[in-house]
Amino acid sequence: MNPEIVVATKADIPDLILSASRLFAEDGGRRDPFMDTGWPAREGAAYYGQLVDSADCLCLLARNDQVEGHLTGRIATSALRPGAVVAVLESMHVAAEHRRRGIGSALVERFFEWAGGHSANEFSVTAYASNEAALALYRKHGFAPFEVTLTRGSSPAR
Ligand SMILES: CC(C)(COP(=O)(O)OP(=O)(O)OC[C@H]1O[C@@H](n2cnc3c(N)ncnc32)[C@H](O)[C@@H]1OP(=O)(O)O)[C@@H](O)C(=O)NCCC(=O)NCCS
């Protein structure tokens, strides 16, 4: 059954923390040796509490009986880029057993809809270069590389 996609409220913070913890463990935890995978459990209540209360931020949950995924986004402006109203897709995750059923796409579409209501004229998202699933999802929704971040560890290859 397709999950319902809802805007999260304070009561949903435990579900946001659960889905964010899955994201940190699966994505950053595997791809970034410095990622603090305990961050959502430790700091999530305060962080998502502030997000759900902010008009410039979006917290979505996909759920049936249990949480199947989440997306968070925010509107960002910068004095260095006057006129740009950027909707930043900050994080998203779909539980492994519910993938390839269109939930990720449904979350992204709801993010675009919300951003349109905030007069966004640019959309951005950051993903690890090795995260092929996420990159394919974002490309499917019209994102394309703009800036590229290059890193190296203390030894050149990692
Ligand atoms: C990336 C992610 C959110 C996709 O969620 P999903 O619900 O499976 O996505 P959808 O079913 O809506 O897929 C939409 C399209 O994305 C692309 N896609 C999704 N997963 C893919 C995969 N594993 N390989 C290749 N393309 C993929 C396809 O184009 C797909 O369309 P199709 O199924 O018609 O081929 C999910 O795999 C996930 O949570 N991954 C771990 C966390 C993560 O990487 N989050 C993003 C961090 S930047």
Image (cartoon, rainbow, N blue to C red):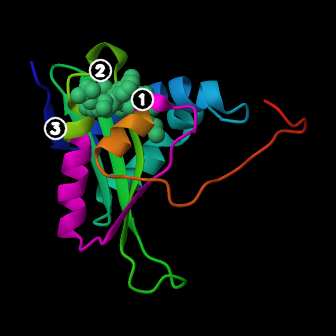
Residue 83 against residue 30 in the figure, above or below: below
Residue with the mark numbered 1: 133
The answer for how far apart the CA atoms under marks 1 and 2 are is 10 Å
Task: From the viewer's perspective, tell me whether residue 137 is left or right of residue 5.
Answer: right
The front one of 26 and 124 is 124
Residue located at (90% from left, 39% from top): 154
Where is residue 31, by image quadrant?
top right
- On the image, the x and y values in percent for residue 101 come to 20, 22
**Residue that lies at the very extreme toward the right in this rendered image:** 155
Ligand 1 within 8 angstroms of badge 1 C-beta: yes
Residue with the mark numbered 2: 99
Contact (Cβ within 8 Å) of mark 1 with mark 2: yes
Quarter of the picture containing the C terminus is top right
Q: Nearer the viewer, mark 1 or mark 3?
A: 1
Q: Which region shows up in magenta?
A: 107-133
- On the image, the x and y values in percent for residue 156 come to 87, 37
Residue with the mark numbered 3: 5
Looking at the rendered structure, the secondary structure element under dot 1 is helix
In primary-sequence order, the first of circles 3 and 2 is 3
Q: Quadrant of ligand 1?
A: top left
